[in-house]
Image: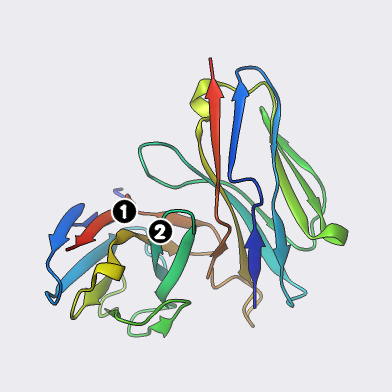
Amino acid sequence: AQKVTQAQTEISVVEKEDVTLDCVYETRDTTYYLFWYKQPPSGELVFLIRRNSFDEQNEISGRYSWNFQKSTSSFNFTITASQVVDSAVYFCALSEENAGGTSYGKLTFGQGTILTVHP
Amino acid sequence: NAGVTQTPKFRVLKTGQSMTLLCAQDMNHEYMYWYRQDPGMGLRLIHYSVGEGTTAKGEVPDGYNVSRLKKQNFLLGLESAAPSQTSVYFCASARGGEQYFGPGTRLTVT
């Protein structure tokens, strides 16, 4: 069975600090997809990134960066120079690949990390 | 293009009552999903559909039924609501991997 663990329940930082959210996953599949979603106080789920298991290249998008390490089954997310608007719950998720080579999208979510950025 | 919409946004039910949550998407996506979100547990998959007329069980299907009679709609039914079904319900649709979530329905069962 698939499992996603976000060991950090809550993180509190002061604006402009860098913060890293940890995600560790378990799966028996050789091909899978990893995701990060943001849930701001308004409640909607905002897609941030999707990576497949064959692509271990780290990615940077503005102040966001992701470090995917298959050897340690981790997919960590770093926010550089955090801002108050980054305050949200962040979810890491995992999905399997179906026989057709794509994803059915059945996401297994971690418990979420509550990030609070203080001014 | 409205994306994924959910009806209703809020609902209070008494134990034993029934209701149907409606999810609609206008992106012509094949796959649709129902999740529930409980405090401290993240989202869990209830049921999903890989195409019109098909449904399948997810991680926590007990107490729920679903139907996908039209490609754009995915209905979630509670036949006899229980307090344990108090939760926020999210619908999502997908094609090609990225899931688009609806705004959620907050359901309270008293």
Q: Amino acid at mark 2?
A: Gln
Which residue sits at x=29%, y=48%? B2
Q: Nearer the viewer, mark 2 or mark 1?
A: 2
Query: Marks 2 and 1: same chain?
Result: yes
Judging from the image, mark 1 belongs to the subunit labelled B
Which residue sits at x=31%, y=48%? B1
Depth check: give the residue in front, B41 or B78: B41
Dot 2, crowdedness within 10 Å: few (<14), some or many (≥20)? some
Q: Position of residue A44 (x, y in %)?
A: 38, 45
Secondary-structure class at tag 2: strand
Q: Which residue is mark 1?
A: B104
Q: Position of residue A10 (x, y in %)?
A: 57, 40
Q: Which residue is mark 2?
A: B37
Residue A109 - label:
none
Q: Amino acid at mark 1?
A: Gly
Q: How many marks?
A: 2
